[in-house]
Structure formats: C-alpha cells, structure tokens
Amino acid sequence: MAKGIEDCIWGEQQLGILISGRGSNMQALVNAADNGDIPSVAVVISNIPNAAGLVWAKANGVPTEVISPADYPDRTAHDEAMAAKLKGYYVTTVCLAGYMRIVGTPLLAAYPNRILNIHPSLLPKFGGPGMVGQRVHQAVLDAGETESGCTVHVVTDEVDGGPIVARQSVPVDTQDDMDSLAQRVLQVEHACYPQAVRLFCSK
Ligand code: GRF
C-alpha cells in the first residue's frame, strides 16, 4: 500500500524549497542535504522568475522551477499549481526560505503540518502580517530589545503563528542599525534552519 507523507521514514523524505530572492537559507539547506545532514532537496521553486537564488541552485545541480503568479488567474490557482509541482517531485516537507507570499489553503491542505518557515526574530515577538525583511529588525531596534534571533516554525493559517521547531538568539548591540542586526541574525539562520529541519524530519 502506498505510504502517506506521515508514514515516510528517514531516507525516503525529500525537501522542496520555496524562494523569492537571494536564497542564502536555501543554500544552507542544500549544503546540509549534500552533507547528508537532512533529506535531499528535490526541487527549488520560485514565484519570481529572476530570483537570484535560482542561479545558485542551477549551478549546484538542484532542479529549479518558476511558478509565477502572473500566469494564474488568482491566488488559489497559483497555490494549487505550487502544490501540484511539489507533489510531482515527491516532496514530503516544504521549506520556505525567503518566500514572500502568504501560503494559502490549497498548499496548506496539500502539506498539512509539513511546511516550515524561517523568520528573522524570536517569535512570537515581531511576527505577523507585514513583519518582513528590514521592518522586523527596525522594530526590534525601536523596541530597545537586547536580544533578537531567528525562529523556525511550522506554517499554519496564522501568519508566523505556527508551532515553533527551533529558535536561536543573538545579542543586539547598542551600535546596531538594521543592516548590522540583519547580518548577525542571518548568520544564525544558516545554522538554525538545517538543524531544525533535521529535528523535524527525524521524528
Ligand atoms: C531571511 O531573513 C528569512 O528569515 C526571511 O527572509 C530572509 C530570506 O533571506 N524569511 P535569504 O533569501 O534566505 O537570503
């Protein structure tokens, strides 16, 4: 009998990574997969045709796909296309890595509790709708926080609100600006995301 996603054991799992831009977290995941630390990466999919991360993925032998919202009548159809493509590559766990779209019902239903995201703050602080990119780091600085960091969480229909898999903190320096803080957080993201995926996939 065919196995469901929940029945997959280590070695049979495959990752799909969704990106929209630079893809440095994608690189960290692909490198970890190449080292055998986490399941292999079956495909990298971008919603942005010229996302920089696609160039790196191709150069490193990872299959890539572009699924542009411009080619679909609405958000639901785009999400359905994403889900179908991921299933076509036999992806069992989806990793959002700088994917700048809200994941809608069709994709959530195709991968229930099997989609992870990395967010550049210590959730539940500084998350939620609109809390993306440099805005997160500016909010941390404005609030006078002495630490920040990153969080890997399961994606649900509540933006940045799903169960937390792992967090890693960094200090906030009094000299920090948005860019220096973003850089320090990004460094720990690259370690935290593969560790969280390993933990999540080895249950
Ligand atoms: C990261 O800061 C991540 O936490 C957030 O988007 C950024 C993506 O960066 N979700 P990259 O594309 O992985 O370099």
Image (tube, rainbow, N blue to C red):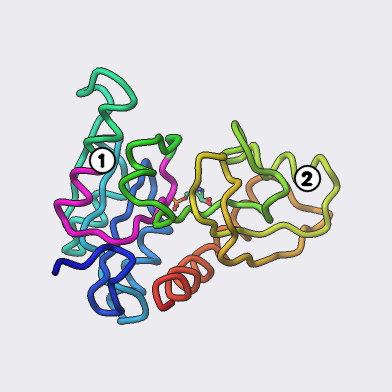
Residue 3 in magenta stretch:
no
Q: CA distance from mark 2 to mark 1?
A: 36 Å
Callout 2–callout 1 Cβ contact below 8 Å: no
Hey, which quadrant is residue 77 in on the image? top left
Q: Left or right: where does residue 179 sit relative to residue 9?
A: right
Residue 98 circle label = none
Q: Is residue 203 left or right of residue 134?
A: left
Q: Which range of residues does the magenta coloring cover?
A: 83-99
Where residue 12 sits: x, y (%)? 23, 74
Residue ID at (27%, 76%)? 34
Q: Residue at x 30, y 20 (%)?
A: 74
- Of callouts 2 and 1, the N-terminal one: 1
**Three-letter code for the amino acid on which mark 1 is drawn:** Met
Q: Is mark 2 within 8 Å of ligand 1?
A: no
Which residue in the structure is indicated by mark 2?
141
Does residue 143 appear left or right of residue 25 in this picture? Answer: right
- Nearest the viewer among 162 and 172 is 162
Q: Report the amino acid beneath label 2.
A: Leu
Name the residue tied to disc 1. 82
Report the front residue among 146 and 2. 2
Residue at (26%, 43%) from the top-left corner?
83
